[in-house]
Structures are given as structure tokens and as C-alpha cells.
Amino acid sequence: MPEATPWRRCSACKKPIALGALYQVCSVSTCNRERTGLAFCSVECWEVHLPGANHREAWAVEKRAPASHLGEKPRGSGDPGGARRLLVRGAGAKPEPKVPEEILIISSRLKEYIRARSGYNTSDRVLEPLSEIVRRFCDEAIKNAQREGRMTVLDRDVPKA
């Protein structure tokens, strides 16, 4: 008896994904474009693509393959309630990352600017307070991007000085 035709093959291990079977997709939109269309048979196979994908934040989303090849969409592909997120990496409640407290200002550029504008010298002790001001502006820009539902901070998010 011939083996049933698989719906697709796993993008990592190339094992068949059967019709009606559960499979994983990447939460990152560039992995889900029509031309890319990555599908993984397991979370382990999804994790295999992460090192090359260079995602900042990603997780596996569980979906179901169509029941037949008649052009049905996978169950759960159109409604948010049908797909289950598997919180694997970078999603959900996560501990607050340690924020670096290093200097954010390029010392040589700042000193060049102040010397060109005024002829004055600049103490290295100026760098920390200026870095703190930059952090506050960045925090406000992050809040503005979050309020807009974006994961990218744009120039319009930065508060006016």
C-alpha cells in the first residue's frame, strides 16, 4: 500500500508533515512569507533554524496542517484562538534583562564638538551624566514605540529636546 502524500516536509529535517498533523512555524514574519514558508515538524527542528535566522525575539507557533490537499487553510491560521504559542525563547514573561550601565557617549567626538564650538576642554566626568540623559530619552522613545504597538524605535518616538 503506497504511503500517503505528505502535506509538506519539515524545513529542517525534511521529514514529512502529514495532512491534519500539528506543526510549528516561526513567529517572525520574514520566516512566514509565501516564498519562505518555513514549517517544522517539532519545536526541536524550529530551534535548528534560529542560529542562522538571527532573530532578536522569536517563538514557535503551533498550527495544524490542512485535512486535505483541496486548498484548505490550516485550522487556526486565520483566527488567533486556533494557534497555540509555544513560549520557547524570547517571549512571554521574562526576567528583566540587565541593562548595561556603560558610557553611551563617544568621548573623542564629544570633545571634538565642544572644542570646535567653544575652544573649551572637556572632562571625562561629563560622559556619565550625558549617558544618563541619553538613557532617559531612549526609555521614553521605547515607551512611545510600545504605545504604538511597534517593536522598532523610530525617530518620531524620540522626545524633543
Image (spheres, rainbow, N blue to C red):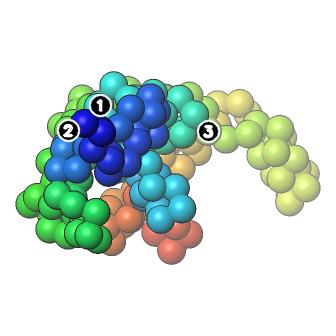
**Under tag 2, what secondary structure?**
strand
Return the disc, 1 or 3, that comes first in the chain's sequence. Answer: 1
Across and down, in percent, residue 19 comes to: 22, 50
- Amino acid type, mark 1: Val
Observer-nearest of 75 and 110 = 75
Compared with 70, 20 (above or below) is above
Q: Earlier in the sequence, mark 2 or mark 1?
A: 1
Q: How many marks?
A: 3
Residue at 48%, 46% (x, y): give it: 135
Q: Look at mark 1 in the image and give the residue it sits on.
A: 43
Tell me, yes or no, whether the two marked residues, 2 and 1, touch with CB atoms within 8 Å. yes
* Image position, residue 91 (x, y; %): 27, 40
Residue matched to label 2: 86
Q: Is residue 72 above or below residue 96?
A: below
The amino acid type, in three-letter code, at marker 3 is Leu
Tell me how far mark 1 sits from mark 3, CA to CA.
38 Å
Dot 3 corresponds to which residue?
Answer: 104
Q: Mark 2 is on which residue type?
A: Leu
Q: Badge 1: few (under 14), some or many (20 or more) residues near its Cα, within 10 Å?
A: some
Relative to 26, residue 95 above or below: above
Q: Secondary structure at mark 3?
A: loop
Find the residue positioned furthest to the left: 81
The answer to which of marks 3 and 2 sits earlier in the sequence is 2
**Residue 3 located left or right of residue 120:** left
Which quadrant of the view contains residue 43? top left
